[in-house]
Every structure is written in structure tokens, then in C-alpha cells.
């Protein structure tokens, strides 16, 4: 058996709901073999993040090289990169690759918590031209585009500004704003924008939903689906995971990644 292979580059979530753990669970649920390169280790649970320790950029570069030198990776994604050194190491590794690359700019949580060192924002903009797809939430779309988002039209305008920064396509995730629950805006270079919708699932247990969406898109691209189809299939996967979300711990639990096996 020779499975399709995908790579995730990001941070470890000790609570198992987001980050590398969520990505690998998603890859497995979608029958893709997942490889990983860690950028940082977090101490966190359902109530919050207690500590973050970044790995040296050289350690990240070695992990990526170890995977790519041996395994035929069909698509990859990035998540939490944390600082300029890790971003630059990631950009250097991704630049020569000819495969689908999803950049999830994990800079600000949907609740507004900053997840990136301030000096790293300029470095992040240099990473964007390497993305086939950029998947910011509303906070990240504002930060990267420099445009305030207060309505639907602002989302579409911000997506155009983000496309000017170099990615092949932009998917702005609307989950952090009540009016846009279940709605995401996809804009591809040379094509009209599309509002993609799924049911808005009423659950407080949605930790890791952004990571899971990006991983599911990456898995479907690795399996050969065109980008718009990969995004739609990924949104359906996340909807299923939210319908069976896991009420674990004392805080915000994660969505269920194994619902696809049912």
C-alpha cells in the first residue's frame, strides 16, 4: 500500500485539540498519511495556553528536510510559526517546492488572542507569495491587509488586498463574527469571489476548527481534488466534526476528528 502523504508545519497542542495534533488526526480521518515538523511546543488544555516554547529555526529546517528528502509529500500546510526566524526557515524550505501549499497565518485567535511575536508580521508577509491558498480568520485578514473589517463588503475588499500580497487564492474564515457563522469567502486569482456556506453549528466546543479546516483542505489537495472542491469538502468535514464536538475538560473542547469513520 502506498498512501498519499501530506506534511503539516506548526505547533504542538498538548491538549490534543488543535495544531499538529488536529492536523494529523484530520489527515488520518481522510486516509492521508500525515508527516509533521514542529515549530514550537505549547503547554495548553481546554482552558487556555499556559506556556509556549519555540524550537530553533535549524531544528525546524532539519525536520522539513528529513521528511522531504525521503517521502513524496503531495501537499503541505503551515500553522503556528510564532517568530521571524521560524517563518524565514519555513519560507526557505517551501520556496523550491512545486506542490499545493496552504498557509494558515496563525497570528490571532478568533477570540482576539495574539499568537505571533510582533516583530514577525513583516516576515509573514514575505511568506504569502509561496501560498497556493491563504486561510486567515477575520482578525488575521485585518492585520495582514491593513483593512478594517466591519461588514460583508469589507471581507471581499480585504481578500482583494490579500491577493495582491502574492498568494494564489485567499479563504477568509468568517467564524469569529456572528453574521458570518458558517460562511467563508474564497477568492482565487483570475476568478470571481465565492461565498461558501455550511450549517452554523451551535456548540462552544470548536477548539481547533481552523486548524482542522486547513488540514482537511490540504488532505483533499493531496488526494488530487481541485482547490474549490477541496475547500467545500473540507468545510463539510469540519461541519461533521462540530456536530459531534467533544465536551471534554473544564473549558472549550475540540471538534471530533473521527466522525468520518462512523
Image (spheres, grey):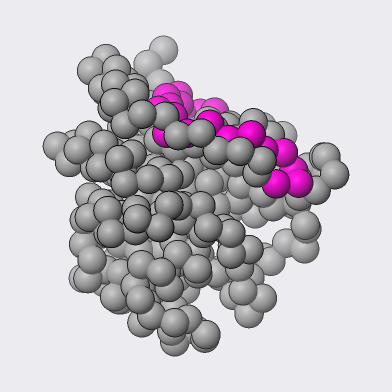
Residue at point 50%, 63% (across, down): 137
Q: Residue furthest front?
A: 119
Q: Height in image: 97 above or below 63? A: below
- Residue 34 is left or right of residue 123, and the answer is right
Q: Height in image: 172 above or below 19? A: below
Instruction: Tell me if residue 35 is in the magenta stretch.
Output: yes
Majority secondary structure in the magenta region:
strand
Residue at point 58%, 59% (across, down): 113
- Residue 149 is left or right of residue 259, and the answer is left
Q: Which image quadrant is residue 224 in?
A: top left
Is residue 151 visible to us here? yes
Q: Height in image: 46 above or below 172? A: above
Is residue 17 visible to us here? no
Q: Quadrant of the N terminus?
A: top left
Could you say where residue 110 lies in the image, as x and y percent from the top left? 59, 62
Residue at point 55%, 69% (across, down): 174
Q: Nearer the viewer, residue 162 or 239?
A: 162
- Residue 126 is left or right of residue 256, and the answer is left
Q: Quadrant of the C terminus?
A: top right
Could you say where residue 163 lies in the image, as x and y percent from the top left? 26, 68
Q: Residue furthest left?
A: 96
Instruction: Tell me if residue 203 is in the magenta stretch.
Output: no
Residue at point 67%, 65% (across, down): 199
What are the residue bounds of the magenta stretch? 28-48
Amino acid at each position: 500500500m502506498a498512501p498519499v502523504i501530506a506534511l503539516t508545519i506548526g505547533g504542538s497542542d498538548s491538549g490534543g485539540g488543535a495544531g499538529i495534533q488536529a492536523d494529523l488526526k484530520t489527515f488520518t480521518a481522510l486516509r492521508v498519511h500525515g508527516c509533521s515538523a514542529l515549530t514550537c511546543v505549547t503547554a495548553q488544555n481546554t482552558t487556555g495556553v499556559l506556556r509556549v516554547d519555540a524550537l530553533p529555526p535549524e531544528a525546524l529546517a532539519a525536520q522539513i528536510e528529513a521528511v522531504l528528502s525521503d517521502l513524496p509529500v503531495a501537499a503541505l500546510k503551515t500553522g503556528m510559526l510564532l517568530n521571524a526566524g521560524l517563518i524565514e526557515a519555513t519560507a526557505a524550505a517551501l520556496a523550491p517546492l512545486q506542490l499545493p501549499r496552504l498557509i494558515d497565518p496563525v497570528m490571532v485567535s478568533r477570540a482576539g488572542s495574539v499568537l505571533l511575536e510582533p516583530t514577525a508580521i513583516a516576515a509573514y508577509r514575505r511568506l504569502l507569495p509561496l501560498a497556493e491558498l491563504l486561510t486567515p480568520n477575520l482578525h488575521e485578514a485585518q492585520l495582514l491587509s491593513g483593512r478594517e473589517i466591519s461588514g460583508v463588503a469589507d471581507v471581499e475588499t480585504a481578500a482583494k488586498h490579500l491577493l495582491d500580497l502574492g498568494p494564489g487564492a485567499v479563504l477568509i474564515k468568517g467564524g469569529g463574527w456572528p453574521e458570518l457563522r458558517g460562511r467563508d469567502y474564497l477568492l482565487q486569482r483570475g476568478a470571481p469571489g465565492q461565498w461558501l456556506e455550511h450549517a452554523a453549528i451551535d456548540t462552544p466546543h470548536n477548539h481547533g476548527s481552523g486548524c482542522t479546516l486547513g488540514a482537511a483542505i490540504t488532505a483533499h489537495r493531496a488526494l488530487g481534488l481541485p482547490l474549490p472542491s477541496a475547500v467545500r469538502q473540507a468545510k463539510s468535514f469540519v461541519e461533521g466534526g462540530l456536530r459531534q464536538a467533544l465536551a471534554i475538560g473544564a473549558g472549550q473542547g475540540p471538534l471530533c476528528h473521527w466522525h468520518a469513520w462512523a
